[in-house]
Image (cartoon, coloured by chain):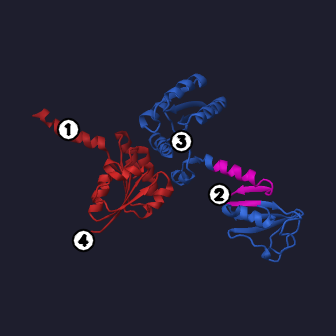
Chain colours: A red, B blue
């Protein structure tokens, strides 16, 4: 049986809730955090982890989510700067080995990478898909 | 050398005005268009309208390594990104940031950014004024540790007591007694007299307890 990991997902939005459900279904321990309690309603039925209601830019909330124990933190809020700070606190203060952040503004990717954060950029991913659709132009 | 002020409103205006009168060149970056328009009239300086945490906005201020960047936004995450952009992308050596939540100081300091924490400054000033009557001087060493000096009066419960019989709270110690301009390094059997000045090293959290034990008042 593969190893079970501990994930902290910050931001229970469309992506956060989906990823949390997926990881939970795969048998990993997952804690999801959001500053809006209603956001947890998005979690799919396969999610069996815990939720922490709090602002991830406050150190106390991150402690409550036991970020120091996490194998990976996913900073998935709607705000790039919040994701950056959460990621840096996770890496630098809590010593989390891997941190992935959602980066909305492609301009920011370089900065995130420079500071050791793995990046998911919806704009670029959509663009790649679009390029696939545009392939007919070359036919 | 110029000073680039990012974010903040009242604070940004007064700060910019102050450094301008001292003869420095100031550039202000702000998200609020109306504020920018007012400011450019009042200060007659370059005001850039935009989100300073975006590289292409910060770039318009043309930051140079010898410049100073001051971030004053109400969100610590924005301040952190602006500070690090200034440092990493533009190689600005001196970056000063407002830290709204004192608990976030740690992360700013981890990157060597100078912090201003109004919460801590105000709390510190308030402490000084609150205890002003009983404490003669007060030196905060760090957020958790302070040295306080308490002058002993006739009516204080510790007068004529040996130090070992004074129930000092945990995390506090009488480090020295000043008596007639002489410094005594006290031992357990040293007797406290009226007119002494007790120099106490203590955890900030037990400061009021220390005062209560020494002076009998809260």
Say whether marks 4 and 3 touch (CB < 8 Å): no
Residue marked by disc 1: A131
Residue marked by disc 4: A1
- Residue B205 visible somewhere in the drawing: yes
> Which one is earlier in the sequence, the residue at label 4 or at label 1?
4
Give the mark toward the camera: 1 or 3: 3
Say whether marks 1 and 3 touch (CB < 8 Å): no
Gap between marks 2 and 4, in whole Å?
A: 50 Å
Gap between marks 2 and 3, in whole Å?
A: 24 Å
Give the mark toward the camera: 2 or 3: 3
Answer left or right for A40 relative to B177. left
Give the mark toward the camera: 2 or 4: 4
* Residue B18: percent from left, percent from top: 65, 32
What element does badge 4 sit on? loop
Answer left or right for B22 relative to B132. left
Residue marked by disc 3: B74
Answer left or right for B64 relative to B217. left
At a point 47% along the width and 51% down the height, the residue shown is A57
Q: Quadrant of the C terminus of chain B?
A: bottom right
* Residue B145: percent from left, percent from top: 67, 61
Q: Quadrant of residue B203?
A: bottom right
Q: Chain under label 3? A: B
**Does the stretch in magenta take in B130?**
yes
What is the magenta range? B120-148
Residue marked by disc 2: B142
């Amino acid at each position: 049986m593969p190893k079970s990991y501990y994930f902290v997902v910050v931001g229970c939005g469309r992506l956060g809730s989906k990823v949390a459900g997926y990881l939970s279904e795969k048998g990993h321990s997952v804690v999801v955090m959001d500053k809006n309690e209603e956001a947890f309603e998005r979690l799919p039925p396969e999610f069996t982890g815990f939720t922490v209601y709090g602002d991830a830019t406050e150190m106390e909330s991150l402690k409550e989510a036991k970020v120091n124990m996490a194998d990976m933190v996913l900073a998935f809020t709607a705000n790039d700067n919040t994701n950056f700070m959460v990621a840096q606190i996770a890496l630098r203060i809590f010593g989390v080995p891997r941190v992935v952040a959602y980066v909305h503004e492609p301009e920011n990717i370089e900065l995130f990478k420079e500071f050791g954060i793995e990046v998911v950029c919806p704009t670029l991913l959509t663009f790649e898909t679009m390029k696939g659709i545009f392939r007919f132009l070359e036919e | 050398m110029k000073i680039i002020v990012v974010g903040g409103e009242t604070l940004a205006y007064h700060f910019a005005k102050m450094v301008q009168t001292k003869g420095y060149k100031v550039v202000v970056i702000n998200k609020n268009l109306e504020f920018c328009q007012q400011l450019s009239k009042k200060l007659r300086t370059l005001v850039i309208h935009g989100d300073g945490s975006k590289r292409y906005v910060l770039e318009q201020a043309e930051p140079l390594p010898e410049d100073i960047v001051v971030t004053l936004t109400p969100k610590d995450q924005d301040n952190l990104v602006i500070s690090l952009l200034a440092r990493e992308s533009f190689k600005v050596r001196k970056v000063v940031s407002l830290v709204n939540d004192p608990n976030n100081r740690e992360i700013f300091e981890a990157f060597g950014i100078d912090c201003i924490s109004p919460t801590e400054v105000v709390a510190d000033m308030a402490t000084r004024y609150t205890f002003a009557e009983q404490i003669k001087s007060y030196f905060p060493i760090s957020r958790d540790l302070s040295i306080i000096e308490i002058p002993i009066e006739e009516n204080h419960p510790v007068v004529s007591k040996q130090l070992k019989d004074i129930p000092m709270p945990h995390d506090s110690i009488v480090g020295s007694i000043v008596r007639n301009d002489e410094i005594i390094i006290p031992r357990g059997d040293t007797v406290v007299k009226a007119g002494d000045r007790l120099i106490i090293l203590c955890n900030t959290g037990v400061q009021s307890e220390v005062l209560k034990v020494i002076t009998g008042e809260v």
